[in-house]
Amino acid sequence: MRKTLFLIAILINTVWSKDLTPTLKIDVNESVKDMVLVNGSMLVMGTDGGKLKAYNLDKKKFTKVVQLPKIKDFMGDSIDTSVSSVDYINGKYLMLSDSGIGGYSDLRINENNKTINIFTEKDKLALVEAKFIDKDNILVAFLSDEAALYNLSTKKFVYREQLNGSKFSNFALNKDKTLAAFASESGEVIVIKPKSGKIVKRLTGINLDNIFKVDIKKDIVATAGKDRRAGWYNLTTGKKDFIQAKFFIYAVSLSPDASMAAFAMDENNNITIVKLSTKSKLFLLKGQNSTLNNIIFKDKSTVFAASDDTFVSMWKLK
């Protein structure tokens, strides 16, 4: 009987995966630092060449490019800034970049082919990430792990809340933007209501070190950690689990129904698709040649990823 149970346990935990290569590779010509998918048909990317680029998936071509002004490096030379965070809503393109001065950030909106400044180095804000909550409000994260909501009409912060004493890493919004999961180098994930800044949950017990990336879909929060733990929390049941990898996990994305997660969890820049209910490894996505920065599920069978090389790849899960 014990032998039978032992064999069943082995079968349940056996790693089953299918290797897949990209069905599409988009040459961006620059490294993509951030990327969002808009209405399933447009990828908006921020690059280390100081550009925002929008790629139409139906037409298979770039339909918009915004070039930001160069900045000065510590030697006084003009260089391209890195666009570290991008977003889009109702014709507005959001771009967060390094100002080149004092570690402060520039935040801009491009609308009708005109770019306006929201923040510059004169505002002395060390921002790391920015996303639209709606057409009038932007959720921003400070390096100091503060969450803040900025209103474009009043040109004032609605709130600015300190979440944790650690350095901020990444935040993610759920589909209807009613919840945001904030991650930091402490290993804690803090879930807030973006409109008010109210803390809903503090999630601990999985990651013991810096969380590089976080995602939230349905009632699941997934984490990608420096401690080599690919983790997930269930906000409804309180259950949590993780898979131990052999390498830093730099990126994560949940499928729209939150049944699967994509983790960048090996030194070969591959992406592992995991079925969360069983911890089964379903697919191994190959084809990226450098460290993964972003992973996005378009739907249950389509995955995009960007890395430190110049290509965005797409895989079909089949």
Image (spheres, helix red, strand yellow):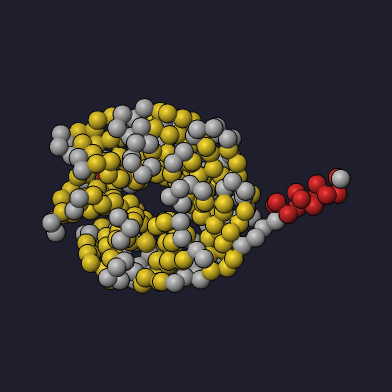
Q: Is residue 46 visible?
A: no
Residue drawn at 52 percent across, 51 percent down: 260
Q: Is residue 19 left or right of residue 171?
A: right
Residue drawn at 38 percent across, 36 percent down: 179
- On the image, which quarter does residue 200 sit in? top left
Q: Is residue 142 above or below residue 69?
A: above
Q: In this view, does 192 lie to the left or right of 12?
A: left
Give coordinates of residue 247: x percent, y percent.
Answer: 60, 55
Residue drawn at 58 percent across, 35 percent down: 239
Q: In what quadrant of the picture does the N terminus appear?
A: top right
Q: In this view, does 133 lie above or below 247?
A: above
| Nearer-the-camera pick, 19 or 100 | 19
Give coordinates of residue 295: x percent, y percent.
Answer: 44, 57
Give coordinates of residue 24: x percent, y percent.
Answer: 41, 71
Residue drawn at 45 percent across, 48 percent down: 257
Q: In this view, does 96 lie to the left or right of 242?
A: left
Q: In this view, does 186 lie above or below 214?
A: above
